[in-house]
Amino acid sequence: MSFDEACHTGLGLSLGCRDSPDHDHTNLQAPPHHHHHHHHRNTYKNKQIQLKYDHLLPSLTLGPSAASKIEEAESTDLHQAVAVQEQASSPCSGAFSSFSNSSSFKRDRELGGEEIEVEVEVEVEVEVEEERVVNITSSRASEELYEQDHEDSPRKKLRLSKEQSATLEDSFREHTTLNPKQKQDLARKLNLRPRQVEVWFQNRRARTKLKQTEADCELLKKCCETLKEENRRLHKELQEVKLMKQTATAAAPPFYMQFPTATLTMCPSCEKICNGGDHHNHHGSSTSSFLIGSKPAHLIFNPFSTHPSTAC
DNA sequence: GTCCTGTTTCAGTTTACTTCA
DNA sequence: ATTGAAGTAAACTGAAACAGG
């Protein structure tokens, strides 16, 4: 990488800078329907409760441990397998009274509406040779009962399937943020909750940013190395020039060379050469200093001085 | 103009799960 | 086979910004 390449990359580590995300405030969602009977006035409380119950709605993808259990049970009876899945991952075992292959996913909270019955669909995913999805739909008598059943249950963590991840990645390549409509569509398509899609995009943006920051950091390191190398080269060049002047003007030195050359030093911050003994006062003296070159010397890193800018 | 509510995004953190020595 | 550390990713929290009533 050349110096120019390194330094003209348009690189900017504006970590504190917030992107200007295209806030799509045209909210296509219905106003948030509160699961709970109490209407929380506080936004955060609302959000917390929403999140709290998000993980309770079972749309779970099993990891290997549960999957193996299912595989085991699957050899005999699919329904047994589902029962195992319920035991393994769902806190609401026994809550399901019927099975269906319906792909319709209804969530009252996300979609709005004052439904009393909550249709819950559980997606069971087994990553053995081919993925198999079993959708379980159940009706519940009331939300209240639902909440009671799920109180204090630990949050379960799902693993997105390869297909789900791939679809999300594809979508992310198209646009890194989602408007509510896109979120809903994607959630419906993947049998996930919109909140899950939202979280996935948040985390994905964070990962992208982290990677970009790391890449920028590497680039900066390279740029720094290039600058150091350039600086070393310039210092060497300067020494050579000094030596040449010393020999060339030995016979008839001009006025400014009548200083003892050994005492001439260059201030790295103000690009002036001064008498070494007069180093800290040269700024006020027009006779003992002069400009050298056209390059601002403060741009030259001095490896021999930890604080070049403090030289004056 | 100010306040309130609701929504989104982000940074930072927690936690469930996986991998590997 | 087991176990614990490290890594990863999903989920959560709190704050800020913004829009609309």
Image (cartoon, coloured by chain):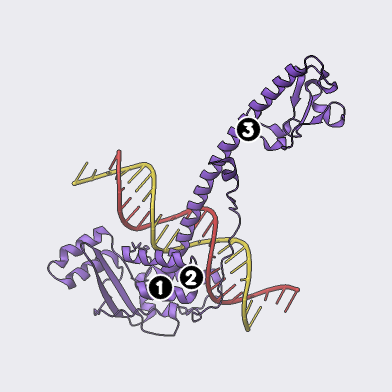
Chain colours: A purple, B red, C yellow
**Residue labelled with disc 3:** A231
Q: Amino acid at mark 2?
A: Leu
When the figure is inspected, residue A69 is found, relative to residue A5, above or below; the finding is below
Among numbered discs 1 and 3, the one appearing first in the sequence: 1
- Identify the residue at horizontal 77%, vertical 15% (top origin): A250
* Horizontal side of residue A184 vs A22, given as left or right: left
Q: Amino acid at mark 1?
A: Leu
- Identify the residue at horizontal 53%, vertical 45% (top origin): A219
* Callout 3 crowding tier (Cα within 10 Å): few <14, some 14–19, many ≥20: some
For the residues labelled 1 and 2, the Cα–Cα distance comes to 9 Å
For the residues labelled 2 and 3, the Cα–Cα distance comes to 48 Å
Q: Which mark is residue A246?
A: none
* Horizontal side of residue A5 vs A55, given as left or right: right
Circle 3: element type:
helix
Foreground disc of the pair 2, 3: 3
* Callout 2 crowding tier (Cα within 10 Å): few <14, some 14–19, many ≥20: some
Q: Quadrant of the C terminus of chain A?
A: top right
Circle 2: element type:
loop
**Residue labelled with disc 2:** A178
Asked if the residues shown at circle 1 and circle 2 are in contact, with their CB atoms under 8 angstroms apart, the answer is yes
**Residue A17 location, x and y as percent?**
61, 57
**Residue labelled with disc 1:** A186
